[in-house]
Image: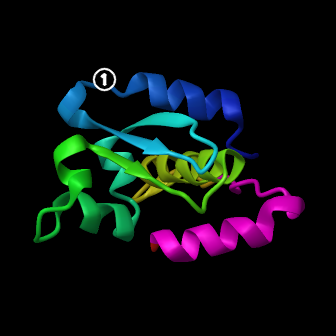
Amino acid sequence: PVCDLAEWKQKKEDVIMSDTDTVKLISADGHQFIVSRPAAMVSGTIKSMLSGPGQFTEQELGEINFREISTVILEKVIQYFYYKLKYTNSTTEIPEFPIEPEIALELLMAANFLDT
């Protein structure tokens, strides 16, 4: 079994969000994703930007621009954030996270940058 898009969208909708509970992630193409803060914090890079020492603009605005990550790749990364949250410390069988071969290399580079 795989974690499909419908399941991911439902998981996202299940999270009750307010302004302080969400982060806006913006792709290179300008697409804006509103993501729960716990999901975004799966990324070590995002976690550092939002909660690390120093005065990052991202901390004040609660939004991060990714000028090098396309919408397709950022969407897949966000799907993984929710997948990781759902299945970390899970006692149920963990389904495979689907990765299309045509985006695998670009996704790997994004995941490396995001420390995911």
Quarter of the image for residue 35 reads: top left
Q: Residue at x 40, y 63 (%)?
A: 43
Q: Secondary structure at mark 1?
A: loop
Magenta span of residues? 95-114
Query: What amino acid is labelled 1 in the image?
Result: Ile
Measuring from the top left, give residue 10's x and y in whole percent: 54, 24
- Who's the residue at 11% across and 69% down the image? 54
Is 21 in the magenta?
Answer: no
Q: Nearer the viewer, residue 96 or 25?
A: 25
Number of numbered discs overlaid on the protein picture: 1
Q: Position of residue 97 (x, y in %)?
A: 68, 55
**82 is higher (above) or lower (below) than 11:** below
Give how far across and how far down residue 48 sits, in percent. 26, 68
Magenta: main secondary structure equals: helix
Residue name at image x 58 percent, y 46 percent: 79
Would you call the spot at circle 1 few (<14 residues within 10 Å), some (14-19), or many (20 or more)? few
Asked whether residue 27 is in view, the answer is yes
The answer to which of 63 and 20 lies nearer the viewer is 63
- For the residue pair 43 and 16, the one nearer the viewer reads as 43
50 vs 74, left or right, is left
Q: Is 59 placed left or right of 40 in the picture?
A: left
Say left or right for 108 vs 8. Answer: right
Q: Which residue is mark 1?
A: 16
Vertical order, 109 against 62 (above or below): below
Residue 106 in the magenta stretch? The answer is: yes
Instruction: Name the residue at 60% across, 63% down.
Output: 68
Residue 81 x, y percent position in the rendering: 48, 52
Query: Does residue 116 appear anywhere in the picture?
Result: no
